[in-house]
Amino acid sequence: MGGAVSAGEDNDDLIDNLKEAQYIRTESVEQAFRAIDRGDYYLEGYRDNAYKDLAWKHGNIHLSAPCIYSEVMEALKLQPGLSFLNLGSGTGYLSTMVGLILGPFGINHGIELHSDVVEYAKEKLESFIKYSDSFDKFEFCEPAFVVGNCLEIASDSHQYDRIYCGAGVQKDHENYMKILLKVGGILVMPIEDQLTQILRTGQNTWESKNILAVSFAPLVQPNRNDNGKHDTVGLPPCAVRNLQDLARIYIRRTLRNFINEEMKAKGITQKAPPKRKRRRCRRRRINTYVFVGNQLIPQPLDSEEDERMEDDNKEEEDKDHSETLKPEEPPRNLLREKIMSLPLPESLKAYLTYYREK
């Protein structure tokens, strides 16, 4: 599934295409997509395909097409502080983007059938927290992943404000999914080849809306144990943050606000990293046809306009090439600089920076 938008050269280019095609429509969703580079979730050797609007699968590792994730993020109508459950959380790509919108007081849980994929998701999450330039620009709700079949969730599990299921749901499992949702909550899942948004309007009432025609692999049916019963899966606990963690959140928030106010007073705006300029596509020339003997032979019809376009394209390519030769300065991490300048013990500075290495 995918191919709804043209391929991009990098993550920003892909997001531009998704915006232009109206798959991304809100600022918060756009910011989350730009902050998480889709290519970071691909295995080495496959990254060339990361910015195409196509699904990707290697073994148990799977990523849906970007246009699908865009529609899901928009349909969930995410807000800070909500609880989110990802049924079939996979690589953690979607859960990490969701965490950037939920903020530090949300709940972000995922359940995934394959243990090797959960390990892969945890590695990618750790890499994002330690190395990504985007981490310090957001207040983050870190995802927690468990291994299990989402059709075996314990009946006494808590309910969620937002739920997404990344596999095809059969009609007889639809009510099972709905019960996991709080009243007023939104569930997005594929049912009968339609990505569907379901709003729980009351204890026993729901409203459904079809979003997009899709094709998903169906949910894997659970196995029975020796007693003929299904094993139940416990979801992560909804833990309350401890005082130390709360202090870190508020110190970072205060410093971030101070930096923004300081820059505003000086009339300085933080520059976004430069985007790679799109190469202008050369239009095909109009062909004219002439008879040579008994054959009809196409011949290009040259014109002054074609020549001007070729000259313009060549100038733009030369200009782009010269710009790429200039070394780019790495973006400054002002929050980290402010933390490291504080008169605090090094161990406390490391804690405030989440032990990040840059």
Image: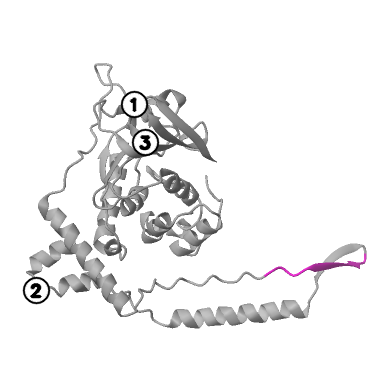
Q: Which one is in front, 4 or 74?
A: 74
Element type at mark 2: loop
Cα–Cα span, label 2 and label 1:
55 Å
Give the magenta part as a residue range.
283-293
Q: Give the residue number, with chain letter if any, for mark 3.
A: 184
Magenta span contains residue 290: yes
The numbered mark, 2 or 1, whose residue comes first in the sequence reads 1
Q: Quadrant of the C terminus?
A: bottom left
Instruction: Find residue 28 and report its image quarter.
Output: bottom left
- Residue 348, compared with residue 217, is above or below; it is below
For the residues carrying marks 3 and 1, which lies nearer the camera in this image?
3
Q: Position of residue 263 (x, y in %)?
A: 30, 76
Q: Is residue 355 visible?
A: no
Tell me which residue sits at (25%, 72%) in the image.
259
**Dot 2 surroundings within 10 Å: few (below 14), some, or many (20 or more)?**
few
The numbered mark, 2 or 3, whose residue comes first in the sequence reads 3
Tell me which residue sits at (44%, 62%) in the image.
11
Q: Which mark is residue 222?
A: 1
- Please, what is the three-letter code of the amino acid marked with disc 1? Pro
Is there CB contact under 8 Å for labels 3 and 1?
no
Q: Could you tell whether 78 is left or right of 212 in the image?
A: left
For the residues carrying marks 2 and 3, which lies nearer the camera in this image?
3
For the residues carrying marks 2 and 1, which lies nearer the camera in this image?
2
Q: Which mark is residue 188?
A: none
**Dot 3 surroundings within 10 Å: few (below 14), some, or many (20 or more)?**
some
Q: Give the residue number, with chain letter if any, for mark 2.
A: 343
**Dot 1 surroundings within 10 Å: few (below 14), some, or many (20 or more)?**
some
